């Protein structure tokens, strides 16, 4: 998959963040791309987690009101030389982004050839803008949940 953001952490912050997120995660055995992240019950769990051979992955639990936010998957590589984590979109949001980008490219190319059909570009621009805005909101929520996980872990220890 394509990671769109890499975050470098200093010293033992990677281990602290990963351990804190494990404490507030529900463990899953299947790929997080195809697992529903909707969780409406009042729980102290904030993430779904998957531990495999190469990395530990997390995704934020969504309420039913947040089901339209794109799923972001956080990956902590088990390679000790990498000090940080990576973020990527889930499979379906990646496909949606590719579809919207191709639509924008196709209408832009058509508008260049016809030189009169610039209004057709409005819909792909609006939908792509909404998708990017929802992704930005999801990134902010994920960041806030990660900080909350660390705060809980430090309070308990």
Image (cartoon, helix red, strand yellow):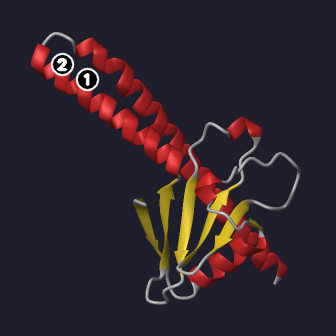
Q: State the residue at coordinates (21%, 12%).
A: 117
- Point 31% across, 35% down: residue: 102
Q: Is residue 119 above or below residue 150?
A: above
Residue 94 tag number? none
How far apart are labels 2 and 1 at the CA level? Answer: 6 Å
With respect to residue 55, does 34 lie above or below? above
List the single residue furthest toward the right: 42
Left or right: where 103 falls relative to 143 = left
Q: Are marks 2 and 1 in contact (CB under 8 Å)?
A: yes
Percent x, y of residue 32:
62, 59
Question: Which residue is tagged 1?
Answer: 107
Question: Residue 157 occupies which quadrant of the picture?
Answer: bottom right
Residue 64 percent coordinates (x, y): 75, 38
Structural crowding at the residue carrying mark 2, measured as other residues with C-alpha within 10 Å and reported as few (<14), some (14–19) or many (≥20): some
Q: Which residue is mark 2?
A: 111
Residue 86 x %, y %: 48, 67
Above or below for 50 versus 54: above
Residue shown at 67% from the left, 39% from the top: 67
């Amino acid at each position: 998959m394509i990671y769109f953001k890499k975050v470098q952490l200093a010293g033992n912050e990677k281990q602290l963040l990963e351990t804190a997120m494990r404490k507030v995660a529900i463990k899953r055995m299947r790929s997080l791309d195809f697992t529903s992240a909707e969780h409406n019950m009042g729980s102290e769990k904030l993430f779904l987690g998957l531990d495999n051979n190469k990395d530990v992955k997390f995704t934020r639990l969504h309420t039913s009101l947040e089901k339209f936010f794109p799923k972001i998957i956080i990956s902590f590589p088990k390679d000790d030389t990498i000090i940080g984590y990576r973020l990527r979109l889930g499979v379906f949001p990646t496909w949606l982004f590719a579809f919207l980008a191709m639509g924008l490219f196709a209408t832009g190319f058509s508008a260049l050839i016809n030189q009169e059909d610039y209004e057709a570009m409005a819909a792909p621009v609006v939908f792509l803008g909404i998708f990017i805005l929802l992704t930005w909101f999801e990134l902010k929520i994920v960041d806030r949940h990660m900080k909350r996980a660390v705060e809980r872990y430090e309070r308990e220890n």
